[in-house]
Each structure stands twice: as C-alpha cells, then as structure tokens.
Image (cartoon, rainbow, N blue to C red):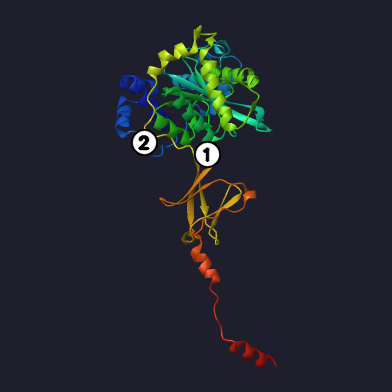
Amino acid sequence: MLSQEDYLMIRTLKARGVYLTDIAAELGVHPKTVSRALRRGGAPSRTPVKRTSKLEPYKAQIDRLLGEGVWNAVVILREIQTAGYTGGITIVREYMAPKRVLRPSKATVRFETPPGRQLQSDWGEIVTQIGEEEVKVHFIVNTLGYSRRFHFWCTDSQDAEHTYEGLVRSFEYFGGVTEEVVVDNQKTAVLEHRTGQAPHFNERFLDLAGQYGFQPHACQPYRARTKGKDERMVGYLKQHFFVRYRAFDSWAHLNQTAEQWLREEADQRLHGTVKEIVADRFEREQPALQPLPAVRYDTAYYETRRVGWDGYIDIRGNRYSVPDDLVGQVVRVRIGLDDRVQVYSEQRLVATYTLQPRSQGWVSVPGHHHQLWQEALHVEQRSLDIYEAVATWTS
C-alpha cells in the first residue's frame, strides 16, 4: 500500500515527465496503483494489513553479517538458509539495498544534483551577545545542492514550528522551491527511521511538503555526511559570520545583518568544489525552482485551553481574558512565532493579544467580563426578621 511519502514521490516524478510504468517500477507497485494515486490526489486512507515477512527472524543475522563486511547477497542467503530461512533471494536484496550507502567504499562519494533538484537543511547553535546578554542562538541553514547558495535564520528554538518557519523563509529568500528537501533525523521532521523501510515523517512536515510541492528525504541515521553540503555551511557560519559579527542589538538586528552578509559576502564567494561564484551559479538554478504557493504556510503553534470559572485562560505562564459566555468551554489558541496570540471559539476569533511576561500581570480586555461582574455585584436582599427569629429560638 502506498504511503504519503510514496505519493509525494509519484507526484514529483510525474512532474518531471517520468512514465507511469517507470514510476511503478521504482516503487515496486503496479502501474494502475500509480495512476489511481494520481487520480485520487493522495495515498489511500485505509489502514494496511501488516504482514510478517519470512525474512523478519533473520534480519538481525543479516545486519551482523553486513557489519562484518559481508555484502554478497548470495553468501548471506546461504548463511540464513542454514539457520532455517525458506524464502528467496529477492527480499534479501531488497532488505540490503537501502543499507548499501553504509559500505565503507562509498562513504565519501559526493554526488552533484541538477539545478532546482535538492535543498539540504540542518541546525547549528552558538552563544553570542544580543543586547547586553550572552544568548544561545539556534540557526537553521538551508543550502541549494546545485549552486551552493544558502540561507540561514537565527532564533531561540529549533522545535518543529521554527524548523518549518526557517524552511519557508529560505524558500522566500531563494524565490522558489526545490523538488526535494533533505533533512537530518530530528523529530521535528522524522518521527522514526525504520531499518530497511521509508522513514516515518512528522505529519505536519508532510503537510508543509504537500503545500510547497517538495519531496521530503531523510539522511541515513548516523550518516550526516549524506547531507555534507549543508553540514559544511554550519561550520562556515561559525568560522566566518559569527567571528566577524559578535554582538547584536536584537534578534531582528541579527537576522537583518545575516541577510546583508549573505548577499555581500557568502553569495559572492568562489566555491572551492564547483570553482564558480555562487551568485553566478544560482542564476542558472533559479529558473529551475518551483514557484512559491499562493498562500504562505502557517508555522504558528496551535493549542487548546479550557476557560476557567473566572473567564481567563493560561498561556505561557500568564493569564488572558476571554468573553464570559465561554466560561467552562474549550477554545483554540494560535500562538505565532512573533508572539501574537489569537483565541478562537470554533471558527470565531474572540480575542487577540501579544504575549506578556508574568511580571506584567494578568491581561484583560474591558467588557469581556461584564456579565460576571454583574453577577458578582448582585447581592440577594433578605429581611432582618429571619435573624430575629433565630435569636429568639436560641435564647
């Protein structure tokens, strides 16, 4: 059964003009499966039936043999047949295929990609001065495989939302999208890298890939050198940009300085591998990039909160008011990376804030709690006769 990753590959290959029969052969499925996926516009939604492979009990033995340098499928087949394996050699070769990149003889082979094909993404971190403080800066580096032009963005976190924001900013900086994006195995993009199988990508990362039209790829675990072009840029930034610039007024000043340095320095460098000015090489790559989508991907955090009896919700250590008719109900909270907060009741926007530190006190909007105050101020009037009767009875 096709996965969402398989569908994205089908769409990418189809866009390149690859025949359906060739796409089917690449995925190991029937051509009709490919054509149905294209008509459907996605992978099948039904849950596949998990089947146990005859090879499953012998995978550990195969891994041990590969670790010992045995890469001949026939030799491995004879070894596991001795242990009781009754299957054929085809599934043995299929299991070995994705592991062949681990062979020492292929460890340092560098490949070149055509214009517009690939972007490599990675994170780095460094301590620098922002304002009057020493701050740990996380920076995402996105490098075009063909031209070696790269873009980086600095922030205070490298979680999923900041990863997606960094990719979107780089696409916008380049003015287009590559066919493939290669990431490391961080959980923001890859939930699980299963041996011998396609990686299990984060659902929101697949959503981003679908909107921007790229095929996600993950480098092999413990094999970051398959993403070496981008790994080099992390070191390049530490040894050049963060040595030349050591203090910044603010986060905005840091990123403004970064883009100016990219245009004036990094883009104008003569690349040692391709022996060409990066900006000149990018001029040939830019027309091959896919266009940006009409709507920008929303990289904000989405959370839910239950409104307290007092008409407030808790967000990032502080409390914010919402209309009193929502007391006890669950609301949806959108927190942008710019600290803008929007509160929704179903599809209705009911409040907008900018995140405030707890030291600033609770944040309230006049009118949110009018009904609550009316109820609090209403005091039932009782006759004093009841108190006289009690006094008479107790005396």
Q: Mark 2 packing: few (<14 Cα in 10 Å), some, or many (20+)?
A: some
Q: Of tags 2 and 1, which is closer to the observer?
A: 1
Side of 215 relative to 163 (left or right): left
Q: Mark 1 packing: few (<14 Cα in 10 Å), some, or many (20+)?
A: few
Instruction: Give how far across and how far down residue 257 sits, in percent.
Output: 56, 24
| Quarter of the picture holding the C terminus | bottom right
* CA distance for labels 2 and 1: 37 Å
Q: Secondary structure at mark 1?
A: loop
Residue named by callout 1? 338
Q: CB atoms at circles 2 and 1 under 8 Å apart? A: no
Counting residues from the start of the chain, the first of labels 2 and 1 encountered is 2
> Which three-letter amino acid code belongs to the residue tagged 2?
Pro
Indicate which disc residue 44 carries. Answer: 2
Q: Is residue 100 above or below residue 395?
A: above
Instruction: Give how far across and how far down residue 187 sits, in percent.
Output: 55, 33
> Which three-letter amino acid code belongs to the residue tagged 1?
Asp
Side of 75 relative to 39 (left or right): right
